Amino acid sequence: MPVLVMKFGGTSVADLARIKNAAQKVKREVERGYDVIVIVSAMSGKTNELVGWVEGTSPLYDAREYDAVVSSGENVTAGLMALTLQEMDIPARSWQGWQVPINTTSAHASARFVSIPRENIDAKFAEGFKVAVVAGFQGVSAEGRITTLGRGGSDTTAVAFAAAFGAERCDIYTDVDGVYTTDPRITNKARKLDKIAFEEMLELASLGAKVLQTRSVELAMRYKVRLRVLSSFEDTDENSGTLVCDEDEIMESKVVSGVAYSRDEAKLTLLRVADRPGIAAAIFGPLAEAGVNVDMIVQNISEGGEGGAFTDMTFSCPTNQVIRAKAAMDEAKAAGSITFDDMVVDSDVAKISVVGIGMRSHAGVAATMFKALASENVNIKVIATSEIKISVLIDRKYMELAVQALHDAFGLEKA
Amino acid sequence: MPVLVMKFGGTSVADLARIKNAAQKVKREVERGYDVIVIVSAMSGKTNELVGWVEGTSPLYDAREYDAVVSSGENVTAGLMALTLQEMDIPARSWQGWQVPINTTSAHASARFVSIPRENIDAKFAEGFKVAVVAGFQGVSAEGRITTLGRGGSDTTAVAFAAAFGAERCDIYTDVDGVYTTDPRITNKARKLDKIAFEEMLELASLGAKVLQTRSVELAMRYKVRLRVLSSFEDTDENSGTLVCDEDEIMESKVVSGVAYSRDEAKLTLLRVADRPGIAAAIFGPLAEAGVNVDMIVQNISEGGEGGAFTDMTFSCPTNQVIRAKAAMDEAKAAGSITFDDMVVDSDVAKISVVGIGMRSHAGVAATMFKALASENVNIKVIATSEIKISVLIDRKYMELAVQALHDAFGLEKA
């Protein structure tokens, strides 16, 4: 039998009625002839409750106990989903991570997959079971302790099972009906994409289009798992949602597929940094140690002069990490490992990115982007580019305007 | 190191503050030099919530999935307790049933222990861990599925660990401060017992003094585990609570140790049953099949006469099983396996029992009991006796009066 993986997130299994609704979707796929592996999250809110208890008990918690506690939400949903399917006369059973077993590293709270042996679940399929309901987000270490994969890990579990079982597709059911050219709340011209390439989805996921966890897309790309994002709350068929797939599957590729944004960005500039070999490491090492997620980095041309060469170094990070970043830089300055005249912080910026695999072969994307922003009088503060992405930092107050202008400029409302 | 088992019930771990309070008690025992095995229940209310979800999903649920779901509450508490102990600088870790492993039968939702190998936990004690926090109520079957022991099973888990590890004592922390001569809500003369024999506790437990699960007392008696019942919510020391122990440990044994009652009893009488060999089996077989818990049984002297011998058969059962019991009897009559003239149901009765190992060697207990009830004009409807217990059914409205009269008659307020 061909295997299909179906993953249901927290809002899709938030109560018994929604679990039943999700089970109806599973039933339809069983009737189409699939052996189905269902990956479930905890009921929405449950994981936060459990995390709250752990943090309330022990701020610097033992991650092994954290994992033992927070993994319990998925176990509940898995059992309830199996029971719901049984009520529909579909032979199903639940699987906790250690029962499969889902072997992971011992990096508790952020474990990575080591192996997912098929034997136990395949044996049940051979016995006539049609559905294996697997608790997402969890696994078991070589030491026999429960592990978790980090928040949002159930998407990654789904992709890993699809890879291990050679599934025809991995369907991620969520509370949106697909991936859009941009956020529909910002412009009603936003259009649902039928297909998007892995690389594009990766850029969009890491840019704040929170439909899929980044790791799950990376894993899907590596193992060529066809991923589909679709809605739990609508009638869906084989053409619903957005397929995330290899770019070879995408016939008509636009130059730009989408416009992403990230609202809570901050820009920090170190003025007149004494330039020398190794200065970048001296700056970004302490930032990494302080847990600051540095995103864009721009270094101005050095100016030679009295006392040696100097440079201005600009980087961006999430707004809520600014205090930590400033402290790390002040400390490094006090320790004498770097020198700079001043530190300028701008906490009111947003990042706008245009993404598209077509950029690889098309010139002029940057020019079109900058022209569109200029015509709306939006000043660009920082620019960074990758092979399939151009990102800019702008004043946050222009964010919506900029997204709309770029969506228009690249004609994204047209299929 | 000597081993101590400490069990905390649902109200004792109902929130983070109470878990911390319980952990303080564990800490004290660690400081006294014990290796401690802590058995925890789910936070109060959690198991009911989980059972509600299972029953809401599937009224005739697959017990394997029921077990997978309802066992999750204990896993949460075990992790939180381990974290709380770690915060107090006590080396501790949590253990789920499959990690120990707690091997049980495959009788899901009412599994029984097969074995509790010591190796894994002993190895951790040898490494310097001082506390093993074990999720109560659960185990793992030979098939690798999660099992549960039935409601209240955490008491039984605690006793089983005490037996397996040769623990010096098994302390059951709960929301009462010990076992009383009778329910203090009925008479303020009720007195806390310092010690009570296993056999007495068994009779009291099954008679509705809901301090300890019956199975846990049976197991403690078989393996000579010294059980102590004491309060989570008071300062306790080595003399607190009530010790349930072998009768050899009890120096001064009163004839009667306690007066128990059970409020919701019903009495059913089949009139003029055609008496013949096998008639009892023909009556109580169908009742057992219908899930009726028959308690007391009284058969009147047969009256010979026209058409053969006849007898009146009386039995008692919980009030909420009367409908099932009547249906089973009517069915058996319709099927011709039994005959009777009429069935009389009295749903307004209560059971009062006096319990004491001293009865074995002292005569006159029954006479004292009947006299005390007669002097209050309480009519006795049914009498049943065992080696260490005399039970009577009376009108429910006299229940409190009867308990008080018997408590006085046997001088139980005096130590």
Image: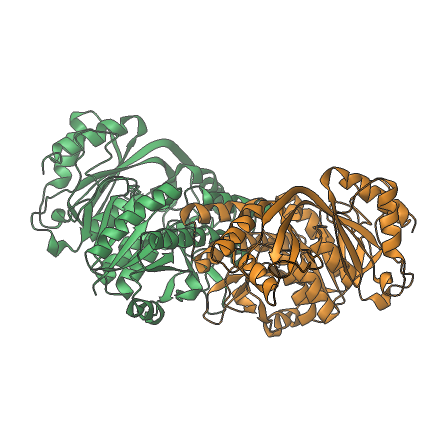
Chain colours: A orange, B green
Query: Against B198, is A375 above or below?
Result: above
Name the spot of residue A50 as percent of width and height, x first.
49, 48
Instruction: From the viewer's side, name the closer residue of B120 and B301.
Output: B120
**Which residue is drawn at the image coordinates 54% and 58% (left, top)?**
A338
Instruction: From the viewer's side, name the closer residue of B364 and B227.
Output: B227
Name the spot of residue A255 as percent of width and height, x first.
88, 58
Considering the image in quadrants, where does the N terminus of chain A appear? bottom right
Task: Kindly tell me whether residue B381 is visible in this rendering.
Answer: yes
Residue B129 in the figure: left or right of residue B227: right
Query: Against A132, is B175 above or below?
Result: above
Residue A8 in the figure: left or right of residue B142: right
Residue found at the very far left of the displayed protein: B252
Number of numbered discs overlaid on the protein picture: 0
Instruction: From the viewer's side, name the closer residue of A240 and B49.
Output: A240
Residue B114 in the figure: left or right of residue A82: left
**Which residue is drawn at the image coordinates 85% and 46% (left, top)?**
A406
Query: Against B126, is A67 above or below?
Result: above
